[in-house]
């Protein structure tokens, strides 16, 4: 629900009675506030939420350390976006809250003033759309977004839905068998070398050269890209035991989406084959936010499949 609002005229004089009524109403409104956060740029919030926009509904969690948004699809993938309190210009939390909401509706509200593009590069231009987020103690109230651009304020009321349970991938640090950290731009380039329309993506990680190999397997054959441990694309390489797992290609399409605004990517895999992809994202305030994905393996490769050679191999060296 969208409502156009006008700003109060600061030069208008209220009578004492009108002023008292306003103050009483403001006090009543503030008494049941559970959470309020302000951000000078709505685009910061929108760009982070867009990286996990692969399902209709999401879980909103307001925590003492920041906001966490959880999105899931078909019990096989989970995306989390964590926005630290330092990213916000102000952050007030009376109690921790958690509810479900329609993610696309929120994204449409955050972009309600449009996204101006550079006429030459077609890249988004800077905007000055501020956003305030309000949620009240009474759960019958909607989530409120107030967006302001050049004195024009728009109020968006987002319906709050019943909370639902989320997937527990039971991903424990002590069970991690490999961890590889990449420069986001370098890994994005590596993914561009393989077919992201293939049936599945195979990950081969070993202590021996080529150390890290991506294989896209499809009906028309397979393409591969190798990244050696000493490549400038790779910042960290830890491997305690060989990994050879297949994952749905769609998962790596999600990864590409997040790489567009990330500076670093950390890939960790545990003994069960669960893949955790973490993206370090810096906002306009140069404060870090974190986007995280959990993917379940499509299937474990048999030993003879692990020895299958790809038809096209690209070596990333610089």
Image (cartoon, grey):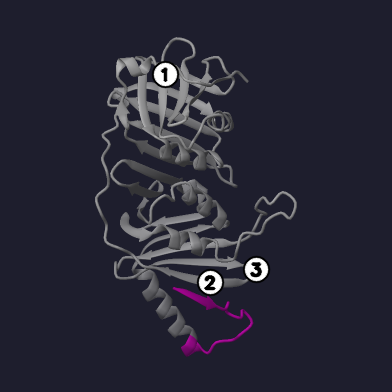
Q: Position of residue 69 (x, y in %)?
A: 39, 50
Q: Which residue sits at x=52%, y=61%?
A: 110
Q: Position of residue 92 (x, y in %)?
A: 42, 57
Q: Which residue sits at x=32%, y=56%?
A: 97
Quick check: 197 above or below 164?
above
Q: Give the camera-side residue of 165 and 18.
A: 165
What whole-number distance in Å separates the C-alpha atoms at marks 3 and 1?
52 Å
Q: Which residue is mark 2?
A: 154
| Number of callouts | 3
Q: Give the camera-side residue of 119 and 46.
A: 119
Q: Which residue sits at x=59%, y=20%?
A: 232
Q: Which residue is mark 1?
A: 205
Quick check: 102 above or below 172?
below
What whole-number distance in Å separates the C-alpha atoms at marks 2 and 3?
11 Å
Q: Is the residue marked by circle 2 packed among few (<14), some (14-19), or many (20+) residues within 10 Å?
A: many
- Residue 305 is left or right of residue 317, and the answer is left
Q: Which residue is mark 3?
A: 150
Q: In which quadrant of the rendered image does the C terminus lie?
A: top right
Mark 1 residue element: strand
Tell whether position 11 is magenta: yes
Magenta span covers which residues? 1-18
Dot placed on the residue nearer the N-terminal end, 3 or 1: 3
Mark 3 residue element: loop
Q: Is the residue marked by circle 1 packed among few (<14), some (14-19), or many (20+) residues within 10 Å?
A: many
Q: Is the residue marked by circle 3 packed among few (<14), some (14-19), or many (20+) residues within 10 Å?
A: few
Which mark lies nearer to you, 2 or 1? 1
Which mark lies nearer to you, 3 or 1? 1
Q: Position of residue 39 (x, y in %)?
A: 53, 56
> Which mark identifies residue 93?
none
Tell whether position 124 is magenta: no
Residue lying farthest to the front in this orientation: 220
């Amino acid at each position: 629900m969208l409502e156009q609002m006008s700003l109060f005229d600061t030069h208008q004089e209220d009578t004492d009675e009108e002023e008292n009524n306003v103050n009483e109403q403001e006090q009543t409104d503030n008494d049941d506030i559970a959470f309020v956060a302000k951000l000078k740029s709505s685009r910061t919030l929108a760009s982070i939420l867009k990286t996990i926009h692969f399902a209709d509904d999401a879980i909103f969690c307001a925590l003492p350390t920041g906001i966490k948004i959880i999105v899931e699809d078909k019990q096989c993938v989970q995306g989390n976006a964590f926005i630290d309190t330092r990213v916000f210009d102000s952050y007030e939390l009376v109690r921790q809250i958690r509810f479900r909401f329609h993610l696309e509706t929120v994204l449409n509200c955050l972009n309600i003033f449009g996204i101006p593009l550079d006429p030459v590069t077609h890249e988004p231009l800077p905007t000055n759309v501020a956003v305030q987020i309000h949620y009240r103690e009474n759960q019958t109230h909607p989530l409120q977004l107030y967006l302001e651009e050049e004195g024009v304020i728009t109020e968006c009321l987002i319906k709050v839905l019943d909370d639902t349970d989320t997937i527990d991938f039971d991903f424990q640090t002590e069970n991690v068998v490999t961890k590889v950290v990449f420069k986001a731009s370098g890994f994005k380039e590596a993914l561009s070398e393989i077919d992201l329309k293939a049936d599945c993506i195979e990950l081969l990680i070993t202590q021996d050269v080529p150390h890290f190999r991506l294989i896209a397997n499809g009906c028309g054959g397979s393409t591969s890209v190798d990244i050696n441990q000493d490549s400038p694309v790779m910042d960290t390489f830890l491997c305690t035991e060989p990994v050879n797992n297949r994952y749905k290609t769609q998962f790596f399409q999600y990864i590409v989406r997040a790489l567009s605004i990330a500076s670093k990517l950390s890939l960790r895999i545990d003994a069960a084959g669960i893949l955790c992809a973490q993206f370090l994202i810096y906002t306009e305030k140069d404060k870090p936010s974190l986007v995280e994905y959990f993917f379940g393996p499509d299937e474990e490769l048999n030993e003879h499949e692990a020895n299958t050679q790809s038809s096209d191999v690209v070596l990333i060296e610089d």
